[in-house]
Each structure stands twice: as C-alpha cells, then as structure tokens.
Amino acid sequence: MLDMKDKIERVLKESPGLKGKEIAKKIGEERKAVNSFLHKNTDCFSQNDNFCWFLSTPPELRVQFEQDQWMDCNAFERSLASAGSPLDLDCPSVVFVVPEKCNILLDAAARFLALCNQLAHVGRAVTIDFNDCKSTLGYFDRIGFIDHLDKRVEVLPQRPSVSRAHIYKGNSQAVVEFGGVDPETEDKELINQLTNRFVQQSDSKYEAAASTVFGELIGNISEHSNSPLQGFAALQKYGGRRNHIQTVVSDSGLGIIATLKPSLEKHYPELHKMHNGKDFDMKLVSAVLTKGEISRHGLGRGLGFKSSREQAIKFDARLSVRQSSFSISFEYVNGQLHDIEQQIDLPTIHGTHLCFDFFVD
C-alpha cells in the first residue's frame, strides 16, 4: 500500500503545479495533513509563489541496486522505481551504485545498458560505481557491456583500458558477448554466432528455433528501430535448478506501440476502436506477441515476432518484452500459454527489450 509520500509523488508526476487542497482531494487525505506533510518534506517537494507544489529536482539521483543476490530484471526494476525514473526526472546527474555481491543477470544487464546509453544521449552525467563489487565490473567487461557503454559514462573505480570481451571473444562456451546491431543494417555474422553457440549449448533440434529468433528479432531492429542509438544482442547459459539459455535483443527505438499505432485505423479498425480504452498499449503488445500477424503495413507479416512466438511455443520458452513504461512476460508449458505476468508504471526506458529463456535440461 502506498504511503503519503508515494501518493503525492505520483500525483505531482502526472499533474505538477497543484495546490495542497487539490493534492489532498486526489489522494483522499485531509488537506491539513497533506499541507503539513508537504511543508515538512521540502527536500522532496517545492512550492512556487502561487502556492503550487512540484517535485523537487535533486542535483543527483542515486540508484542503489540490491546487494547479496542475483539481480534479475525484476530486481533491477525495483531499484529504479525506489529511486525514481532517471529519464523523467530533471536531474543533471545519475549515479548507479552496484553494491557488494550484486551479480547482475543478462536480462537486467541489457535493460541497464540501454538506459545508461539513453541517459548519456540526452546529456545526463552518468556514473556506474563498481567500487564495492569489482567482480561485476569484470563480468561486464568480459561480456562486452563496457564496449557498448557510451564513452561519456563514467565507470568507477575506472573503465578497463583493454577490453576482455575483445581479447577472449568466442572463447567461452556459455556466452556470446554483447554484439552491436546497427539500425541501418542486418548483422548476419552476429546472428550466426548466436545461433551456433545456442546449438552448442543445447541440441541440434534447437537450430531452426535459434536461427529464427535471432534473425527475426535482430532484423526487427534494423527495420523498425528508427533510432540513432545502436541496438544489441547477447546470450548466456545458466545452470542451477534448470539449465536454460537466456538471450536478449534490445533497441532504443520507437517501440512496438509507436510503430503500430499510425497504421491501426487503416489496417486494423477493430483494434483502433479500442485505442482510448484502458491499458490499450499493453493489450496491443500482448496481441502482437500472442496472435501475431499485426503489421504497420497491414500485410499480415507481423512486427517481426510471429515465427519467434511459434518457436517459443514449440520449445516451452519464456518470453518477456519491456516497453517504455511496462513489461509483459509469457510462459509456455506443453505447447500452451501457461502464465502471463504484467508490470505497469515502470520507470521510462525507451525502445523494445526482449528476453527469451529456453529451458534445455
């Protein structure tokens, strides 16, 4: 349940410049209590000469990741939400703190990399502090995260002078290092690397699935991204209770919604009628990933997901997609959709960030 601070922050984020009585009405609290709280928390809230309230702009936003754990995308999103949305807050500096024994999984690393590059692209001063967790800095160097991190991002204690990903590229049987995807071209070499390593770590029966997924999704970046920022893809095999291969494909482009919406009225009138309905964006993405054959050109090819979805069903994979402010994950069991998980009101990260988990035990 949200406390008063969270309630007020949410209201002022959506409608800045409200007076105390207006805030109280929106959150269902007594005006006197709200005004008292606002005046006691001027580090978080500021008032102008017209007695209207706004979120205070911190000179530096610190995002503290959780320590002593493996950080997946859900833990990454929790840390972001706790600190605030770096792309939405008007703060000049953002510091990400990686604490002791914070081991970051590939799906979280992909979102993290995209966010850092987007922040640097809009002129924010970005720092990643690995002082208390140099092992994760070493891992990021090895998988190519640092190679694809904007050069303007400060890395503490220091950015590696020589790339271990470049030195040892292709030597690990469990990893395909982050590879850049130019929105203007299709990288067939990267697609082949990902496919071959996937098959090596699983079985030849997965070759068509891997080739389809990587070819389709990387091609999707080239066709639909419309961003000056480079996309990227990577792969890693994990053990534990169930062996699985995690693959990520990310871009910082328009996203599925912005790509499809202009074509709905002409090609998909039934979907267009739902345009102003509740949770429309999430419903549209869900339709793309579960039904397919929804294209901005109206030709039935789908937005680069149809065949990938079919392979996910065939091999009981887990597929997640992260858009600018929400994510959806689909889990398939015995060829059927078993579970859908949705997260809403996430901090902004532009683009489309996909993760496939193929279980290969």
Image: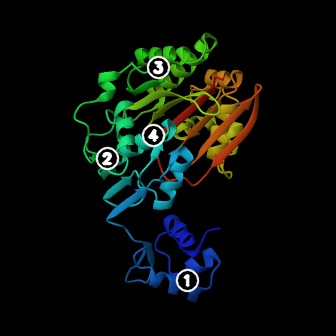
The residue under the point 30% across, 59% down is 92
Closer to the camera, 216 or 235? 235
Mark 4 residue type: Ala
Of all residues, the one furthest to the top in this rendering is 204
Choose the circle earlier in sequence order: 3 or 2.
2
Q: Which residue is mark 3?
A: 173
Of all residues, the one furthest to the left in this rendering is 161
For disc 3, the neighbor class at 10 Å (few under 14, some 14 to 19, many from 20) is: few
**In this rendering, which labeled residue sits more in front, label 3 or label 1?**
3
Choose the circle earlier in sequence order: 4 or 1.
1
How many numbered discs?
4
Q: Which residue is mark 2?
A: 120
Q: Which residue is mark 1?
A: 34
Task: Tell me the distance, in whole angstroms, between the alpha carbons under discs 3 and 1.
Answer: 58 Å
Which label sits on residue 109? 4
Q: Residue 153: x and y, percent?
A: 29, 45
Mark 2 residue type: Ala
For disc 1, the neighbor class at 10 Å (few under 14, some 14 to 19, many from 20) is: many
Whether 164 is drawn above or below 83: the answer is above
Mark 3 residue type: Gln
Q: Residue 135: x and y, percent?
A: 38, 41
Q: Is residue 196 left or right of residue 329?
A: left
